[in-house]
Amino acid sequence: MDEIITNNVEEIQIATNNLQVLVKGLGAAHLGIGVTLTGRILNPSIDSLIGPDAARVITDNRYMAHAVFFGAAGLSFENRLCISYAFEDEEATLVAYATRPTETRVLMADHSKLGRTYGRRAPVSLEDMLQTTKECIVISNFANQASETIEREVAALKNLLDPFANSKDFRQTIFVFDWLISKGLSIANTLCMDCVRESGNH
């Protein structure tokens, strides 16, 4: 939200369950930013409305989402996809963000969350995340102390993507694992279903 406002992005509509996004959106009303807040159960620890009612708004097909952004308490691609979360009532909204139809799906998890598999595991597979989007992006930040974990997770992700390589259903789907190393710079592995292409600024 800070980047959207700083860069004067205009005329966008945001549906969110996060109160901080709502407050910042209200402060940017002059840009034509509209914010729809989901209902219903407030979890003050994460400033978010969670639970089945919130999930119903997120998956409402009246909202044609160009992009969906969501976070996780932990993320690992070893031993199949594991997206973990902290609070029981988060499951419904996390699954909704991970599976609702959209052009682009973005999962954000900083390096401290990579490889983390404790907590509650969301019932979401890699196939679930890919079925209803054209592009799936995982964004993390690069840190030297996490380089071994990153290498391990990238190798595991490639293995997870292998079964989709010959599937015509996913041939045009793009998966990007992007590590931010500083503002405006990234090291990106773009994993198409049938190829691996590395690019980025070092």
Image: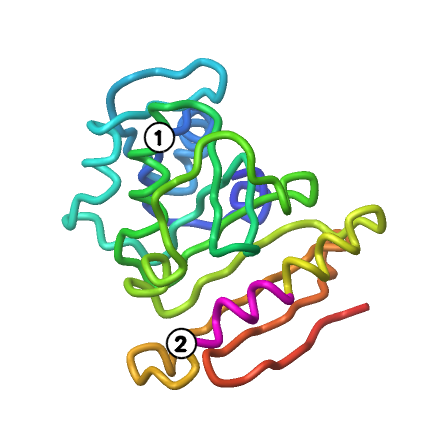
Residue 58 place in picture, x, y as percent = 26, 40
Q: Residue furthest right?
A: 144
Give the side of residue 169 with respect to residue 158, left or right. Answer: left
Q: Are marks 2 and 1 in contact (CB under 8 Å)?
A: no
Q: Which residue type does callout 1 highlight?
A: Asn
* Residue drawn at 74 percent across, 61 percent down: 185
Magenta stretch: helix, strand or loop mostly? helix
Tally the marks: 2
- Label 2 sits on a secondary structure element that is helix
Q: Is residue 83 magenta?
A: no
Q: Who is closer to the viewer here, 4 or 31?
A: 4
Q: Nearer the viewer, mark 2 or mark 1?
A: 2
Which residue is under mark 1?
A: 17
> Between marks 2 and 1, how big is the CA–CA gap?
32 Å
* Residue drawn at 61 percent across, 40 percent down: 116
* Residue drawn at 42 percent across, 67 percent down: 135
Which residue is under mark 2?
A: 164
What's drawn in magenta, residue-wise? 155-163
Q: Residue 81, labelled with which disc? A: none
Q: Is residue 156 magenta?
A: yes
Q: Is residue 168 above or below residue 30?
A: below
Q: Which residue type does callout 2 highlight?
A: Phe
Q: Is residue 151 above or below residue 93?
A: below
Mark closest to the chain's N terminus, 2 or 1: 1
Residue 94 place in picture, x, y as percent = 37, 39
Q: Is residue 93 above or below residue 176?
A: above
